[in-house]
Image: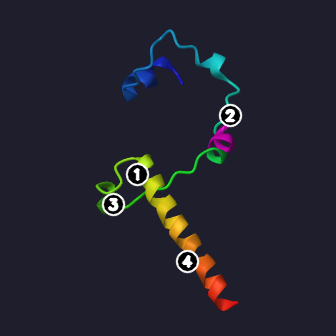
Amino acid sequence: MNKESAVKRGDEMRKEYDLSKLAGGVRGKYCRRVAAGTNLVLIEPDLVNMFPDSEAVNRALRVLADTAQTANASKRRRSR
């Protein structure tokens, strides 16, 4: 790429940046590592008001999980 074509395209890269020193970069090098430590869940817009932050979501899920666990335990006791 020559300087004239960069100017024509409107590149705003500064002259002092030497792109030849950036050779050898690997795209997505740490992608798997980041994805392994992330559990991102998107909630519907209508629920955002009910669950404004992750603490509220976690509290609600714990209540739901405890309720489900209690219901399963009582089902098992009745079936015996």
Marks 2 and 1, the one that precedes in the sequence? 2
Spatial CA span between label 1 and label 4: 23 Å
Marks 4 and 3, the one that precedes in the sequence? 3
The amino acid marked with disc number 1 is: Ala
Q: Is residue 68 above or below residue 63?
A: below
Q: Decide if residue 63 is on the left or right side of residue 21.
A: left
Marks 1 and 4, the one that precedes in the sequence? 1
Q: Residue furthest bottom?
A: 79
Q: Which mark is residue 56?
A: 1
Helix, strand, or loop for circle 2?
loop
Helix, strand, or loop for circle 1?
helix
Spatial CA span between label 3 and label 1: 11 Å
Query: Residue under circle 2?
Result: 26
Q: Position of residue 47 (x, y in %)?
A: 33, 60
Residue at 36% from the left image edge and 61% from the top image edge: 44
Q: Which mark is residue 2?
A: none
Q: Which mark is residue 71?
A: 4
Density class for disc 4 (Cα within 10 Å; few <14, some 14-19, many ≥20) is: few
Query: Residue under circle 3?
Result: 47
Q: Is residue 66 above or below residue 71?
A: above
Q: Is residue 33 magenta?
A: yes
